[in-house]
């Protein structure tokens, strides 16, 4: 048995086949970079994204043949609004990074409604205010999973799963229904909202594809990576080091105590919903991870490629006292300081490109250790082993420093993007490819396991972070 997985990411759309042996086959990808017409704005053409997804899906199916089901993973909170009759988007989609609604979020906070600009809620209202101020049109909202399901089923199904919906800012705390107070305050008609379905289970047939395979798995990208790395039991955690960094911990049926954000800066998430039962977790967020490597390569020109950073960093024994704080976009968990900025300390006349490169890799790893400590503080758990994926997981210098900074073994995922596997597992459980969570857990076979060595100087790291914080005090004062 095999599953077609479509993964709509921030910078690319991918499709691949996941077979019953948990192999990812016939992968096809297309770049889909968003636009930034002004500082703080991130938008894209939703029709272009779905056309790229269909192109990739058909390419994978042509190479493999018929499949038993379809799984979908997507960037969370990116917001699409389309006309129900024509099926066409009515405005550019707003990406999850878009900050145009910061002012509105601050206004709402004064009224006791706590929303962040990277959630969908204020993005929906902003689009509706522009294209339907009187709220008379028959429109649909969805994140990219909803939009893709709508197109795949030729408008038969307007749905999303709870792992996506729970980060929109529209749900009540227990995840059972939409919050009427938020909808009323933002002027969002209930008619525009998708029906919430399970993360694993039949949704409808993808009639636009050959063979009309059933769509039976939906997941947000980070929850997909959690499932893809077989972190499906309480206390298991993974970190994805991509453009940013996301640590997710699987908890169980009990919702975390924090309504919005824990004391150490983590957020409650829905890992998945199955048979209408929710599995909860927490998430810690690093605002920039691989972005720092891109800065070294594309902006500074210190190294020719991201892949070459490992050899360059390994050419020196240590950073020679250089410390880098990766706060190019501010600091997320546990600090939540939007006014912090990337900083290099300890630079001398003898500092080389190799020292700086090693310091950048070490800085991302140290911030990864901060995420681990925050998650443990907010959950009361001890995370004994870390599983990681994403582009930086292929860098052995980085992985070793992460193990050293956290003081625990690090297991590298067998595939670079575990999200694809996770969406495949969710869809596959619905059609019998995998019998359940025990069988999914048994699939884990890390590409490598790195044991911790000499502990890093966490006190010096904390001092460097303190110096990098509040560089722009007016931004540091923002809190969502």
Image (cartoon, rainbow, N blue to C red):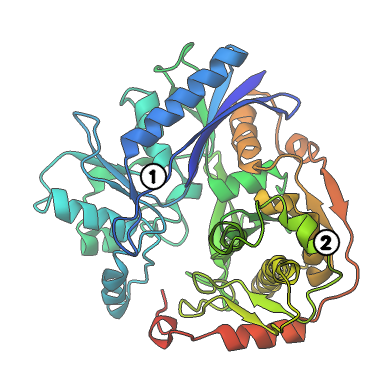
Q: Is residue 186 above or below residue 21?
A: below
Residue found at x 71% / y 29%: 435
User: Dot 2 surroundings within 10 Å: few (below 14), some, or many (20 or more)?
Assistant: some
Dot 1 crowding, Cα within 10 Å, few <14, some 14–19, many 20+:
many
Whether pointer 1 and pointer 2 mark residues with C-beta atoms closer than 8 Å, the reply is no
Q: Position of residue 460 (x, y in %)?
A: 74, 86
The image's mark for residue 143 is 1
Residue drawn 54% across and 84% down? 469
Q: Which mark is residue 338?
A: none
The CA span between labels 1 and 2 is 42 Å
Q: What residue is at 60 percent from the left and 15 percent from the top? A: 63
Residue 82 at x, y percent in the picture: 25, 38
Q: Earlier in the sequence, mark 1 or mark 2?
A: 1
Name the one closer to the observer, 240 or 38. 38
Q: Disc 2 on helix, strand or loop?
A: helix
The quarter in which the N terminus is drawn is: top right
Residue named by callout 2: 314
SS at mark 1?
Answer: loop
Q: Which residue occupies the foreground of this view, 245 or 208?
A: 245
Pick whichever, 257 or 442, lies toward us: 442
Q: Nearer the viewer, residue 113 or 150?
A: 150
């Amino acid at each position: 048995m095999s599953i077609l997985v479509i993964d709509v990411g921030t910078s690319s759309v991918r499709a691949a086949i996941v077979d019953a042996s948990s192999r990812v086959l016939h992968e096809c990808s297309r770049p889909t970079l968003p636009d930034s017409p002004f500082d703080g704005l991130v938008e894209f053409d939703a029709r272009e994204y779905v056309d790229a997804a269909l192109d990739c899906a058909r390419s994978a199916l042509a190479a493999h043949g018929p499949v038993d089901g379809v799984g979908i993973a997507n960037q969370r909170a990116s917001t699409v609004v389309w006309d129900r009759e024509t099926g066409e988007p009515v405005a550019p989609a707003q990406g999850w990074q878009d900050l145009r609604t910061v002012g509105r979020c601050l206004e709402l906070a004064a009224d006791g409604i706590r929303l962040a600009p990277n959630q969908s809620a204020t993005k929906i209202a902003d689009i509706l205010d522009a294209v339907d101020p009187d709220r008379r049109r028959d429109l649909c909202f969805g994140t990219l999973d909803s939009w893709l399901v709508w197109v795949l089923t030729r408008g038969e199904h307007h749905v999303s799963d709870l792992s996506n919906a729970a980060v929109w800012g529209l749900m009540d705390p227990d995840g059972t229904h939409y919050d009427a107070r938020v909808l009323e305050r933002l002027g969002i008609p209930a008619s525009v909202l998708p029906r919430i379905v399970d993360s694993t289970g039949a949704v409808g047939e993808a009639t636009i594809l050959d063979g009309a395979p059933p769509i039976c798995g939906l997941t947000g990208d980070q929850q997909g990576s959690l499932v893809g790395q077989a972190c499906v039991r309480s206390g298991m955690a993974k970190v994805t080091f991509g453009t940013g960094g996301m640590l997710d911990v699987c908890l169980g049926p009990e919702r975390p105590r924090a309504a919005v954000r824990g004391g150490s800066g983590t957020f409650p998430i829905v890992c998945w919903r199955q048979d209408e039962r929710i599995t909860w977790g927490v998430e810690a967020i690093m605002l920039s991870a691989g972005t720092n490597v891109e800065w070294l390569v594309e902006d500074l020109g210190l190294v020719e490629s991201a892949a070459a950073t490992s050899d360059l960093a390994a050419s020196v024994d240590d950073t020679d006292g250089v410390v880098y704080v990766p706060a190019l976009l501010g600091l997320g968990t546990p600090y939540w300081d939007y006014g912090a900025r990337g900083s290099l300390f300890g630079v001398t006349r003898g500092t080389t490109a190799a020292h700086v490169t090693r310091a950048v890799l070490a800085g991302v790893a140290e911030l990864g250790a901060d995420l681990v400590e925050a998650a443990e503080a907010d959950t009361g758990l001890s995370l004994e082993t870390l599983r990681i994926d994403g582009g930086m997981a292929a860098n052995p210098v980085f992985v070793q420093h992460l193990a050293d900074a956290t003081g625990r073994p690090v297991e590298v995922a067998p595939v670079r993007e575990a999200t694809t596997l996770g969406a495949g597992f969710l869809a596959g459980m619905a059609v019998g490819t995998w019998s359940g969570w025990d069988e999914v857990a048994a699939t884990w076979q890390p590409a490598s396991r790195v044991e911790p060595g000499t502990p890093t100087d966490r006190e010096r790291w904390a001092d460097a972070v303190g110096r990098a914080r509040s560089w722009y005090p007016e931004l540091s004062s923002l809190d969502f």
